[in-house]
Amino acid sequence: MKRCWCIQPKANAEFVCRMEDVLDVYQRPHDPASPWRAWTRPANSCWAKCASRCRCSRSAACRQDCEYERHGTANMFVLYAPLEGWRHVDVTERRTAVDFAHVIKDLVDVHFPRALRIVLVMDNLNTHGPASLYEAFAPVEARRLAAKLEIHYTPKHGSWLDMAELELSILARQCLGKRMDSRSHLASEVAAWEDRRNASHATIDWRFTTADTRIKLKRLYPAVQL
């Protein structure tokens, strides 16, 4: 399948450094004691269809106006463990540092309590860091959670490196193509999709490696003066 990459046109040492770091994580063998997770956090709107309908004659098909009544927005925290074929979506009202911290706590204590260390691949949103844990929990608890994490950030303009973005694309196509009238409706639809995907243990066959980048994306690497 062909992919379109959104990348910086100018050589950037920081970009290639983070790109290779993430790709090296993807090449790690499966380790239940130190699983790795891809992470993303898109927003989705909740709205309802307008109840009014257009008047039509008996000989014509009934039509409905495209106008809708917006009921607010919802945020989705998407967690994806590709080696386990597992994903989880938390639907929240907002995506603040405190919201992020509580999702991390659930990841550590509920979803993978036996893991010695959890490897996270995620983007550089200002709330995506251990500091958010200190805004939500006491220092002792925040330190305990932070000590379980090994965080790797995707480079700027490198969201295509986040496997969770692929899961999000599938979620959007299979579940989010219809209007939903409330956050609870959205949560129930997403939960049903999540159960179906997890039951089938759907995974991603990621084949792009660090060696590939040095050939196909050679133009991104800074010229080295020897």
Image (tube, grey):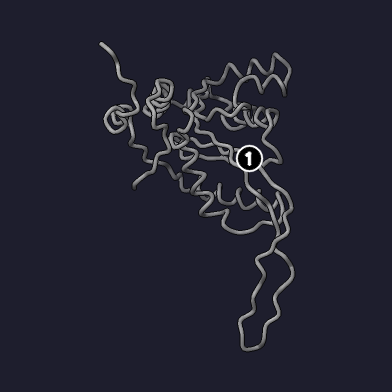
Residue in the image at 36% along x and 28% along y: 27
Residue in the image at 73% along x and 59% along y: 69
**Quadrant housing residue 215:** top left
Q: Amino acid at mark 1?
A: Asp
Number of marks present in the image shown: 1
Q: Nearer the viewer, residue 161 or 148?
A: 161
Q: Is residue 50 above or below residue 225?
A: below
Left or right of 119 on screen, residue 75: right
Residue in the image at 57% along x and 39% along y: 78
Q: Is residue 28 visible?
A: no
Residue 76: x and y in percent read: 62, 41
Residue 35: x and y in percent read: 48, 27
Residue in the image at 62% along x and 89% along y: 59
Residue 87: x and y in percent read: 53, 40
Pointer 1: what residue?
90
* Quadrant the C terminus occupies: top left
Residue at the outermost top position:
226
Residue at the outermost bottom position:
59
Q: Is residue 102 above or below residue 61?
A: above
Left or right of 137 on screen, residue 177: left
Residue 50: x and y in percent read: 72, 65
**Quadrant housing residue 51:** bottom right
Q: Is residue 215 above or below residue 75?
A: above
Q: Is residue 161 visible?
A: yes
Question: Crowdedness of circle 1 by 10 Å Cα count: few (<14), some, many (20+)?
Answer: some
Question: Which SS class for mark 1?
Answer: strand
Q: Nearer the viewer, residue 51 or 146?
A: 51
Q: Nearer the viewer, residue 22 or 146?
A: 22
